Image (cartoon, coloured by chain):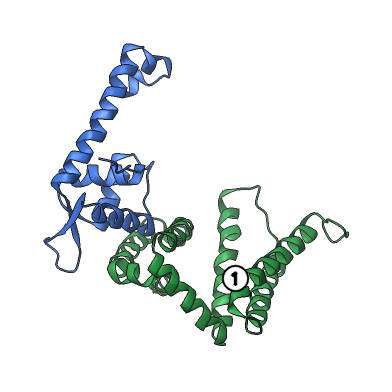
Amino acid sequence: MNFQLSQSEFYILLSLAIKRRHGYDIMKQVEADTAGQVQLGPGTLYGSIKRLAESALIEEVAGDDRRRKYYALTEEGRRSLASELSRYDDALTLARQHDLLQQFGLARQRQ
Amino acid sequence: MTNHVETSFSEDLYDRLLNLYPRAFQQQFGEEMRFVFSEVLREAEAASGVWGVAVVWRRTLADALVSIITQHLNDQEGHATMKNHLADLVMENKVFGWIALATGLLLLIPLVAMQFNSGVNWSTGDFVVMGALLFITGSIFVLTARRVDRAHWGLVAFVVAAGFLYLWAELAVGVFLTWGS
């Protein structure tokens, strides 16, 4: 898997791992997941959706509201997200082993 | 009622902004993007009124600037189409309306920045001078481009942009003359 996920794309995949969503729903979920740290504008959101769809990580699916386009993770998208999460997990384990979370003042926030 | 007028004006303006994306991208996502923008706008307006609308525009302009350039760079076909559109537009007089619109949008950047950053403090005169400078620069490019071969438009754009930057620097701090404050 050579596809390099940007920060926006990672959070979009994460939001779609929970359930299928339309654009506005993705935007709100990403904002909530990151406590407002990542706020996607329409251009960035749909630019990312385009790239993810072209790479077959997400696909357009039917949804409750016919006026909107809904997106869901594909199997390839699940694999890509799992691989990315595994990378973060490894990094976090390593940081814990070296007491880096405490050193950077992150231990309390993450517990 | 006033709020409704502001919202629909913003939506009309956003429609124009959408026209700057590659055509294929517009066709694929334009309607959805407009939908999302409208929802964000209404939510912000309901929560914070005109201030909320201003915040949405500040984010939207920054987002649009980056994403429009990115989509054109990513889309070779769109790139060629944009060049053709630009070439056609330069020959039509409505291009001056677009230059005026672009000038207005660019002036929104310092206007909005002033609300958040006390370091940005433009007077009315500054807005008038910068507005005139931007509009005249755009118009000079168009009028010159109409008289030269398309192959040389890049050079024309470079010279005009360099002239704009020189005048801006001269007016702001002075380079060779004493116009600057």
Q: Is residue A36 above or below residue B7?
A: above
- Looking at the image, residue B180 lies above or below residue B129: above
Quarter of the figure with the C terminus of chain B: bottom right
Picture quarter with the N terminus of chain B: bottom left
Q: Is residue A108 left or right of residue B148?
A: left
Q: Which residue is mark 1?
A: B103
Chain letter of the green region: B
Residue B21 visible in the shown view: no
Residue extending furthest toward the top = A98
Whether residue B172 is visible here, answered yes or no, is yes
Label 1 residue SS = helix
- State which quadrant residue B143 falls in: bottom right
Work out whether B138 lies above or below A27: below
Q: Quadrant of residue B94?
A: bottom right
**Left of B117 or right of it: where is A7?**
left
- Chain A rendering hue: blue
The structure residue drawn at horizontal position 34% and vertical position 46%, both measured from the top left corner, is A8
